[in-house]
């Protein structure tokens, strides 16, 4: 007689990993292409901000305490694999350009790709680890549903990082599941207050998740054991949503990811896109084509959007780059002021722009319940009778509105060229996208790199 008792967590995790590996072994060019694009997008985002003074200083401090022999392109110092992964994860968040998976309210690749970059020997090994870590992270993100007062980076990313490291260290499926269970024993609580105040320690959330993941994989390989039925733990059950769903699915999370083409949290992009549409429809009617903001500053400006956006990006008065990256009113004001969102607009000098600040004070957020998808509508009223509105329900880069290959490659090129030059950028992109799976993950570049 068949038992109705559910399988313990480690048994379900093994089945989950076996199913994913069978999917990967099948001849699926679309999956192969998506994995390479996801790797390229996150890797180029992680490398692209390395010249920031704070990130150079972070490298130097790590090199003082734990010098290593690994020096990826663009690095100022040679570090250990863990140190390099930590820096890459922090850098990936610098401009908030990392892709994401909306049902998980976060970015699975953020905690996975930095480890692939430092531990991956071949393209095939890196893509396998990326696939496993991404799909696990997506499932745990769906389960966790980040509560109010927390930020997603560094929470459910730790188990995804542990699995990624375990796969690349080739320690076997028993130890892979042990590493995942060990990571779930240490679910961190990453507080949102750091983003609210614009504190740069928020960059360390994914960094520490990545390092913990590597350490937990090493511990599992050394024989450190972990609970086999971890998701029956009452504390874990309380912070999550029942048991973690690890059942096979027809649709893969990585095929439903979104890609960012402008900086900032994804939530503010809907606000910016609605504002762009509003400008196109009504801008000339109120003289904005000549940048006359007088009438607009005397109007009522409302942004209507979904509650999650207001929950994470409701900062009403951003005064620094990180606060602006998580501010809906900034996204609307900056787009009204300059016509679009660009990296430079998040800098301190532009944040002090008097017209921008006046617009920020004029905008009211209105949270609207009852819609399942993400959306935003900008409504401007010069008086109670005339209301001019523009709404968007999707963005370029969303699963239903994918950007094309040229746009994805152009994003990577724009991020990498200032760091390593045009020639090395072209070599790196071509290698990651087209080299055989058995090829070394890193091609030979003019940029200094020690193995």
Image: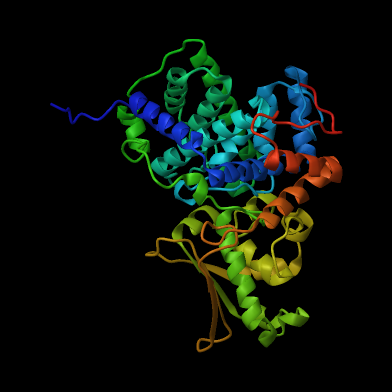
Determine whether 403 is above or below 110 in the image: below
Which corner quadrant of the image does residue 332 belong to?
Answer: bottom right
Please, which residue is most extreme toward the bottom here? 385
The quarter of the picture where the N terminus appears is top left
What is the count of numbered marks? 0
Residue 185 in sight here: yes
The quarter of the picture where the C terminus appears is top right
Determine whether 73 is above or below 80 in the image: below
Image-based side of 69 in relation to 202, left or right: right
- Image coords of residue 81 (percent x, y): 68, 23
- In the image, 187 versus 428, the foreground residue is 428
Determine whether 217 is above or below 366 in the image: above
Identify the image's colour scheme: rainbow, by chain, secondary structure or one colour.
rainbow
- Residue drawn at point x = 63 percent, y = 63 percent: 331
Residue 298 in sight here: no
Image-based side of 247 in relation to 382, left or right: left
- Image coords of residue 134 (percent x, y): 52, 38
Image-based side of 62 in relation to 21, left or right: right
Image-based side of 446 in relation to 313, left or right: right
Please, which residue is most extreme toward the left here? 1
- Image coords of residue 316 (percent x, y): 58, 60
- In the image, 57 versus 142, the foreground residue is 142
Please, which residue is most extreme toward the front here? 27
- Residue drawn at point x = 48 percent, y = 30 percent: 159
- In the image, 165 versus 426, the foreground residue is 426
- Residue drawn at point x = 51 percent, y = 31 percent: 158
- Image coords of residue 215 (percent x, y): 56, 20
- In the image, 334 versus 358, the foreground residue is 334
Which corner quadrant of the image does residue 287 belong to?
Answer: bottom right
């Amino acid at each position: 007689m068949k038992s109705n008792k559910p399988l313990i967590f480690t048994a379900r995790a093994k089945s989950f990993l076996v199913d994913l590996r069978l999917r990967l072994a099948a001849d699926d060019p679309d999956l192969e292409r998506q994995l390479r694009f996801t790797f390229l997008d996150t890797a180029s985002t992680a490398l692209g901000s390395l010249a920031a003074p704070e990130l150079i200083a972070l490298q130097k401090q790590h090199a003082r305490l734990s010098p290593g022999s690994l020096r990826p392109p663009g690095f100022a110092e040679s570090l250990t694999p863990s140190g390099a992964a930590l820096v890459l994860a922090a850098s990936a968040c610098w401009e908030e350009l990392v892709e994401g998976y909306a049902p998980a309210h976060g970015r699975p690749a953020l905690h996975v790709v930095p480890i692939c970059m430092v531990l991956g020997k071949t393209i095939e090994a890196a893509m396998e680890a990326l696939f496993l870590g991404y799909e696990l992270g997506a499932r745990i993100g769906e389960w966790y549903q980040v509560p109010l007062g927390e930020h997603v980076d560094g929470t459910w990313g730790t188990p995804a990082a542990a699995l990624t490291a375990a796969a690349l260290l080739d320690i076997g499926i028993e130890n892979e599941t042990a590493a995942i269970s060990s990571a779930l024993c240490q679910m961190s609580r990453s507080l949102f207050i750091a983003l609210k105040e614009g504190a740069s320690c928020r960059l360390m959330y994914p960094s520490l998740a990545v390092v913990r993941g590597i350490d937990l994989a090493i511990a599992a390989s050394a024989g450190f054991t972990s609970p086999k039925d971890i998701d029956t733990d009452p504390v874990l059950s309380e912070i999550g949503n029942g048991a973690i769903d690890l059942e096979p699915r027809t649709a893969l999370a990585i095929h439903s990811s979104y890609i960012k083409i402008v900086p900032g949290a994804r939530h503010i992009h809907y606000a910016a896109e609605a504002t762009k549409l509003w400008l196109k429809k009504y801008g000339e009617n109120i003289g904005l084509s000549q940048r006359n903001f007088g009438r607009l500053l005397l109007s009522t400006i409302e942004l209507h959007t979904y509650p999650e956006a207001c929950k994470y990006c409701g900062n009403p008065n951003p005064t620094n780059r990180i606060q602006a990256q998580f501010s809906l009113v900034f996204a609307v004001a900056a787009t009204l002021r300059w016509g679009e969102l660009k990296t430079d607009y998040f800098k301190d000098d532009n944040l002090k722009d008097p017209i921008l600040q006046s617009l920020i004070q004029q905008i009211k957020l209105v949270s609207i319940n009852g819609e399942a998808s993400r959306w935003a509508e900008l409504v401007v009223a010069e008086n109670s009778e005339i209301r001019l509105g523009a709404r968007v329900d999707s963005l370029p880069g969303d699963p239903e509105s994918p950007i094309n290959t040229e746009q994805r490659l152009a994003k990577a090129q724009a991020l990498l060229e200032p760091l390593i030059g045009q020639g090395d950028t072209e070599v790196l992109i071509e290698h990651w996208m087209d080299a055989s799976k058995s090829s070394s993950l890193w091609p030979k570049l003019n940029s200094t790199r020690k193995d």
